[in-house]
Image: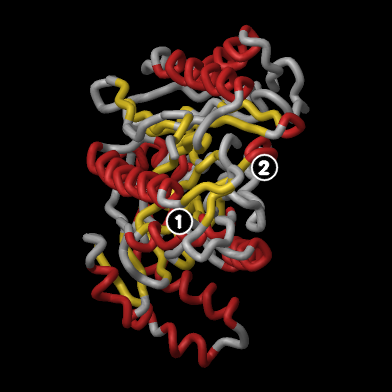
């Protein structure tokens, strides 16, 4: 949480931090700027002090909505700097020089945010070389801001819950859309007598997402049959939607403008399910229910991943624990944190470096899955779990998990 920033800065020996860049798609800046609706900006925070928001003059009122103290680039003569300097890099270095002098920023400064890698390297190198009394510090993932964002307060949890409700609406609308079609030779048929395709379903899902005023930057997975057996296959647009085939429907939706995410997956078959799909689905469902009962404060996420592997192997499925390169069975991590990014700390993996412990405030996915592309199917279920401030485990996903959708 944001209240942890000063402690995290002290751990890393930072006197100050800067988050900068375009606002859209920039969780670090969005987080520190309290979601201000500006095009770009800079948040500068000295350890033990409140952040300051540096914005362009034309964005000053939107920046003020952040609740932070706002200063504008006009106050530092940035337009004059741009006219005087030979290039934009030199101008930006001079802007930082003036801002840091005014705010009395000295010592070790950590830099965060999103930028082109080459441009960021050139800027940070120039700042380190040219600003007296400033030592530019890098921070590899998980960064200080990543760690602060790992735990959420009740207000953040409520925003995620609200996106979840709209996500459930979209899933329900999509299922009703599918059920509205007639069936001929096991294919779904549209009103104009043409087959319903995966591409047409994707188009309808995008319409439902827009109605709910959400965004899905990573795209929607609506994959059928063999495609469902490859975890991130989004589906072949030309394929005709058929009865009896497993369909994985998964998307991470966020508030419009770069806010909080929610992530949910359901697997279903239209009309009926083949016996091998029914058995695999039951194994995934049972695994999810078992895992939810194990979550508690202080438990290692790596241990929970191990439990999932042991469960699936006891049911006869290969896993990445016994074969790290397997492309059948349980082939991916068990879950991940959800917040201003759809994938963030904590992660549930078998990596020896994974030392994450569940804490109050963690919001994360539980998404066991089994994949058999050569047999033409895959199954994944995904719920969102919140460990509230009291340490109680709450499931924020309430959408039904029926395997067979009656047609």
Along the horizontal axis of the image, is 289 left or right of 398?
right
Q: Residue at x 73, y 15 (%)?
A: 322
Q: Residue at x 56, y 39 (%)?
A: 243
Q: Does residue 298 appear in the picture of this structure? A: no
Along the horizontal axis of the image, is 229 left or right of 133?
right
Q: Residue at x 56, y 50 (%)?
A: 137
Question: Where the C terminus falls, by quadrant?
Answer: top left
What is the number of the mark on residue 205? 1
Neighbour class for label 2 at 10 Å: few (<14), some, many (≥20)? many
Mark 1 or mark 2: whose residue is earlier in sequence: 1
What is the number of the mark on residue 227? 2
Q: Nearer the viewer, residue 402 or 305?
A: 402
Q: Nearer the viewer, residue 229 or 343?
A: 229
Q: Quadrant of residue 23?
A: bottom left
Dot 1 falls on a residue whose secondary structure is helix
Neighbour class for label 1 at 10 Å: few (<14), some, many (≥20)? some
Q: Nearer the viewer, residue 358 or 336?
A: 336
The coloring applied to the image is secondary structure
Q: Quadrant of residue 219?
A: bottom right
- Image location (x, y in percent) of residue 209: 40, 57
Examine the rendered structure and indicate whether residue 128 appears above or below residue 400: below
């Amino acid at each position: 949480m944001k209240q942890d920033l000063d402690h995290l800065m002290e751990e890393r020996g930072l006197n100050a931090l800067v988050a900068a860049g375009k606002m859209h798609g920039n969780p670090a800046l969005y987080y520190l700027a309290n979601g201000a609706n500006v095009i770009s900006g800079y948040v500068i925070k000295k350890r033990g002090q409140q952040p300051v928001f540096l914005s362009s003059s034309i964005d000053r009122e939107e920046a003020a909505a952040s609740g932070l103290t706002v200063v504008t680039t006009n106050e530092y003569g940035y337009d004059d700097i741009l006219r005087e300097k030979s290039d934009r890099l030199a101008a930006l270095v001079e802007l930082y020089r003036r801002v840091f002098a005014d705010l009395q920023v000295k010592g070790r400064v950590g830099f965060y945010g999103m930028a082109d890698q080459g441009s960021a390297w050139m800027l940070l190198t120039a700042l380190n070389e040219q600003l007296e009394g400033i030592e530019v510090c890098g921070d590899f993932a998980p960064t200080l801001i990543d760690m602060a964002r790992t735990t959420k307060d009740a207000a953040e949890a409520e925003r995620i819950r609200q996106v979840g409700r709209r996500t459930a609406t979209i899933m329900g609308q999509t299922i009703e859309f599918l059920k509205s079609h007639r069936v001929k030779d096991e294919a779904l048929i549209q009103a104009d007598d043409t087959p319903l395709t995966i591409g047409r379903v994707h188009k309808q899902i995008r319409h439902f997402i827009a109605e709910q005023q959400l965004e899905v930057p990573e795209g929607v997975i609506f994959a059928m049959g063999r495609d469902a057996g490859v975890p991130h296959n989004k589906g072949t647009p030309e394929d005709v939607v058929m009865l009896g085939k497993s369909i994985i429907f998964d998307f991470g939706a966020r508030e419009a403008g770069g806010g909080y995410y929610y992530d949910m997956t359901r697997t279903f078959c239209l009309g009926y399910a083949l016996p091998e799909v029914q058995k695999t689905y039951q194994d995934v469902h049972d695994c999810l229910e078992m895992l939810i009962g194990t979550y508690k404060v202080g438990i290692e996420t790596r241990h929970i991943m191990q439990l999932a592997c042991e469960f699936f192997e006891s049911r006869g499925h290969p896993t990445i624990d016994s074969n790290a390169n397997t492309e059948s069975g349980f082939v991916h991590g068990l879950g991940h944190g959800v917040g201003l990014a759809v994938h963030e700390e904590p992660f549930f993996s078998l990596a020896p470096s994974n030392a994450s412990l569940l804490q109050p405030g963690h919001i994360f996915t539980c998404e066991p899955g089994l994949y058999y592309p050569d047999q033409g199917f895959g199954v994944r279920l995904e719920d969102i779990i919140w460990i509230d401030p009291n340490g109680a485990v709450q499931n924020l996903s309430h959408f039904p998990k029926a395997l067979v959708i009656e047609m």
